[in-house]
Amino acid sequence: MTLTWNNCFSEKRFGFSIIQPDIRTEYERDWDRIIFSSPFRRLQNKTQVFPLPEEIFVHNRLTHSLEVASVGRSLGKIIGKKLIKLEEIKSDDKARKFYRNSLKNVISAACLAHDLGNPAFGHSGEEAISKYFKKRDTENTVDIEFKKQFSP
């Protein structure tokens, strides 16, 4: 199947065979699932690293993720309004409804989740972890088996 503007979204969720009617859409429920998750709550204990911050308050990743989600929601609204003007979307009621009402929720939820699972120290932490795994002893059986799980 070719991916198009009209088929790149779905309310079906993994593990759920039936979509139950709710006052919230599945996309809004995704947001709620993230907000109430333990990994999201743990972001409050991770400092957002800024070089020489001008403000004295501590900015954590939870606050950062909420700010990013706010911007993402606004951008989703703007983009959704533009997309519903495309000819292929104009003729599809389901697609038009998604882009008008739900795209903002999808983008906002993705923004909320963007820092989940990141290591300490941000990009520096990612680089340190990467270097560690690149230098692992490739003659060791355990290391060889471990490396087989990843592509170069």
Image (cartoon, rainbow, N blue to C red):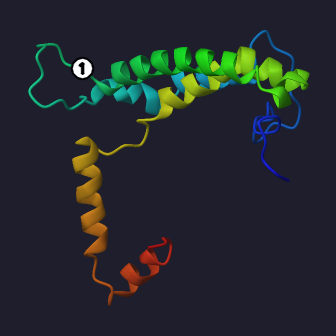
Q: Quadrant of the C terminus?
A: bottom left
Q: Which residue position is annotated with label 1?
A: 59
Which residue lies at the image location 82% right of the left edge and 51% below the top edge? 2
Left or right: 88 as drawn, with respect to 146: right
Q: Is residue 25 above or below residue 14?
A: above
Front one among 26 and 51: 51
Is 23 positioned to the left or the right of 113 in the image? right
Residue found at x 67% / y 23% = 103
Residue shown at 54%/19% (left/top)?
75
Number of numbered markers: 1
Classify residue 85 by image quadrant: top right
Q: Position of residue 39 (x, y in %)?
A: 45, 33
Q: Is residue 73 visible?
A: yes
Counting from the top left corner in percent of width and height, residue 138 is at 33, 85
- Residue found at x 37% / y 43%: 118
Residue at the far top: name it.
Answer: 23
How far across and how far down the image is residue 96, in percent? 81, 21
Residue 9, located in which quarter of the rendered image? top right
Q: Nearer the viewer, residue 54 or 128?
A: 54
The amino acid type, in three-letter code, at marker 1 is: His
Residue 36 at least partly seen = no
Q: Residues within 10 Å of mark 1 (few under 14, many from 20)?
A: some
Q: Position of residue 74 (x, y in %)?
A: 53, 14
Secondary-structure class at tag 1: loop
